[in-house]
Image (cartoon, rainbow, N blue to C red):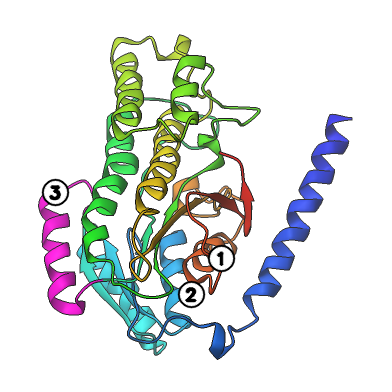
Amino acid sequence: MDTYKKEKSKEKREKRRQEISLLRTIPYSDHRKWWSSDSVAVVTGANRGIGFEIAHQLASHGLTVVLTSRETGVGEEAVKVMQEGGLNVVFHQLDIVDHASIEAFSKWMKETYGGLDILINNAGVSFNVGTENSTENAETVIQTNYFGTKNMTRAMIPLMRPSPSGARIVSVTSRLGRLRGKKNRITNVNLRQQLEDVDTLTEEIIDNVVKIFLEQVKDGTWESGGWPQVFTDYSVSKLAVNAYTRLMARILEDRPEGHKIYMNCYCPGWVKTAMTGWAGHISPEDAADTAVWLALLPDQFVSGKFFAERREISF
């Protein structure tokens, strides 16, 4: 029975992916386009994989894209490929775990473009491949995937340009960090409840959850701490980003009309990229689709939601 169910759900996923590939070929009509060639999208960690593909698709829709990467050489090469294809993409070095780097980037964005319209938080790291589940690099994973994403979001919000359609923030996360997932969820009920209640959720609560996790990693007690059992450090980092997305959406909803910022997150799936050791079953093109779709939504002002394959899923 389990095998039958797995096959059926695999078939459904494949059918959905085919639908999305088709949807992606349908151009946006002019009256649905809220953006122009002057609209600016920033994509972090975009020298390869999903980030590269998100940047490529946004530029193909006619936006100006700022592709960022920690390493200058590979970032410039990635941009050159797109520029040769006639796309309006520029490069700027950015390391999201380095406050000085974020500050320099923010200053450059303000001076060069006066701000931005779309932020795609894609930069992230994972050190486990296949069945590995080491937490040896937990500190780096949390610092990059959660604190880096948070610091970048915080720095870009004051630069988001006003518009009737609102600015957009999309963070690349993972179903592995779901609170209510059947598998891989936090089994510590107290911590889960704290993260679940969006009305009482605070940055301090999220920071404290990752702090407890890192303390247990250091003293070797994390395995009995009720944390996710698959890609533990990565899952906790994405759980934190998911919670932060809900928190920020709640805070940002009070902004006046014309200054709205909509913030969502999405799971790209198990993608064939260097991060998964090329073991995924989804192409980067398909994986990038939901980020681009969310960033360009013409008239559906959703915020604080979690998506996969253009559909809302539960946190």
Of marks 3 and 1, which one's residue comes earlier in the chain?
3
Q: Quadrant of residue 170?
A: bottom left
Residue closer to the observer: 131 or 160: 160
Question: Is residue 97 found inside the magenta-colored segment of the image?
Answer: yes
Q: Residues within 10 Å of mark 1 (few under 14, many from 20)?
A: many
Q: Position of residue 264 (x, y in %)?
A: 47, 53
Q: Residue 188, can we see it?
A: no
Is 114 situated left or right of 221 in this image?
left
Judged from the image, the secondary structure of the residue bearing numbered disc 3 is helix
As drawn, the label of residue 255 is: none
| The residue stretch that appears in magenta | 95-115
Identity of the residue drawn at 13% across and 70% down: 108
Q: Quadrant of residue 40?
A: bottom left
Q: Are marks 3 and 1 in contact (CB under 8 Å)?
A: no
As drawn, the label of residue 57 is: 2
Give the amino acid type for the residue marked by disc 1 in the picture. Asp
Q: Is residue 256 above or below residue 90?
A: above
Identity of the residue drawn at 39% across and 90% down: 86
Which residue, given by chain and number where applicable, does mark 3 sit on? Answer: 99
Give the amino acid type for the residue marked by disc 2 in the picture. Gln
Which residue, given by chain and number where applicable, does mark 1 sit on? Answer: 289
Give the amino acid type for the residue marked by disc 3 in the picture. His
Q: Is residue 120 above or below residue 98?
A: below
Image quarter hosting the C terminus:
top right
Question: Is residue 29 found inside the magenta-colored segment of the image?
Answer: no
Q: CA distance from mark 2 to mark 3?
A: 29 Å
Q: Position of residue 73 (x, y in %)?
A: 23, 67
Q: Are marks 2 and 1 in contact (CB under 8 Å)?
A: yes
Q: Residues within 10 Å of mark 2 (few under 14, many from 20)?
A: many
